[in-house]
Structure formats: C-alpha cells, structure tokens
Image (tube, helix red, strand yellow):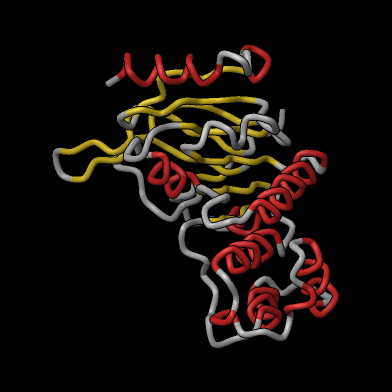
Amino acid sequence: MDAPAVEARGVEKWYGPMPAVRGIEFALGGGEFLTIFGPNGAGKSTLLRMLCGAVRPTRGTVRIAGDDVRGEEEGWRRKIGLLSHQTFLYPGLSAAENLDFYARLYSLPDRKARVAEALRGVGLLDRAADRVRTLSRGMQQRLALARTLLHDPEVVFLDEPYTGLDPHASAMLRAVLDRLKDGRRTVVLVTHNLSQGLEQADRVAVQVGGRWVSDERRGQIDPARWERDYTERVAAAV
C-alpha cells in the first residue's frame, strides 16, 4: 500500500504556555484536495508551515509520502510546493530571472521552456522581462504561484492564495487549482474566506483555536447551508 501523500499524527505547536495548534490528525491520499477553513488566529498558517517542514512541531509527526519531515532524508522536499504570505521572489530580478533561479536550484532540464510555460500558465508571459518590483501585488502573487508549481510538485500547500488578487487573477487561480485537481496533485489550501476553496475540495476541515472542530467529505456539505453551519461551528468552539 502506498504511503499517504500527507500525514499528520498528534501534531501540536506550543509557544511557551500558549498552544497554536493542538492534536491535529489526518492523512491525505494522492490527488486529494483538502481545504482548511477557520477564522484569523486559528493557527491555520502555523499548521501549514509544519506540514511543509518550515516549522518544527512541539509534538507529533508529519510525513510526506512516508518520509518524516524531521528526518535526515530530505527527498520529500522536491515533492512539495509552498505558496505562503512571503513570495520568496527577488525584487531586483525580472519575472523570468526569478523562475530561472529556482529552476537551477531544482536542476530542471529545459529551463527556458519550463520558465516560459510557467509564466504562460499564470498569464505573465508578456511581463517576463519586467523586474518584480515593478509588478502589482496581484502579479507578484501570480508569479509566486508559478514559482510554487515550477518543478511540478506532487503536493501543493497554499496559504491564503487569493490575497491581493483582482477578479481576473482570482479566476485564473481557480483555473490553476482545477488543473492541479485534474492532474491528481494533492493540495492543501488554507483560507478564512468561505467562498473560496469549497468548489475544488474533496475534504473540508474547520480549525478554531488550534483544533479541528470538523472534518468532512465535500459531499457531506450543503453549499446553501455552509456559511450558517460554519458560523455555528466556530461559535460553539469559542
């Protein structure tokens, strides 16, 4: 049996006496799309950073394709892509130069073609030569998404990816998420916006106060009642 694409067992993060994430347990198979909803301050971003190995859990274990993210084996890092609040872009370089830098880090073949394909996928091919500092916030977010997907990761982590996007860019992001889903990529999307992320999700969790207060298959959720059900769950957990 194949190992889960993403697995969390008893994952917690404490900052001194204050818990940020408590008792998270789940496993995602290849191609599953999980959306984690929750209010600001629920610990969603902290959880995401632990899942991708950027933050060490206080307790518990995270595995990517069977590999413990705290172990010595780091092959799992090439299997993931992260889009976070930080773009990890170099403002003095052009859009194409930024992606070429990351293509070199991943030792990707046919770098020029890969970079052009990535820029085309987010609608920025015509801005390839423009320095990042001249791009709008939304364009930088789209370029960061291209960076995230450049090496064709098996698992994609997205932290509030719609932040700063205009309606056109938001529609483009939804199309990218659809392609990831169709391509059987495993996706973990974190958001506090109830209108985003539900459509593509196979599984939906609600996180409040560092804990998951619900974890359901998408088919169990009535979209017409979703906002009310979510509000009730958050209120009951506070």
- Tell me what residue is drawn at x 48 percent, y 49 percent: 69
Q: In which quarter of the view is residue 93 placed?
A: bottom right
Which quadrant holds the N terminus? top right
Is residue 59 among what the camera can see?
no
74 w.r.t. 192: above or below: below
Q: Position of residue 36 (x, y in %)?
A: 51, 33
Q: In which quarter of the view is residue 7 placed?
A: top right
1 w.r.t. 172: above or below: above
Q: Position of residue 26 (x, y in %)?
A: 51, 27
Q: Nearer the viewer, residue 199 or 155?
A: 199
Q: Position of residue 79 (x, y in %)?
A: 65, 53
- Tell me what residue is drawn at x 71 percent, y 35 percent: 30
Is residue 66 among what the camera can see?
yes
Looking at this rendering, what residue extends furthest in the front direction?
167
Q: How many numbered markers are drawn?
A: 0
Judged left or right of residue 172, residue 209 is left
Judged left or right of residue 171, residue 42 is left
Q: Nearer the viewer, residue 1 or 109?
A: 109
- Tell me what residue is drawn at x 60 percent, y 37 percent: 196
96 w.r.t. 236: above or below: below
Q: Nearer the viewer, residue 231 or 68?
A: 231
Q: In which quarter of the view is residue 238 placed?
A: top left
Q: Position of residue 82 (x, y in %)?
A: 56, 55
50 w.r.t. 108: above or below: above
- Tell me what residue is drawn at x 58 percent, y 33 percent: 195
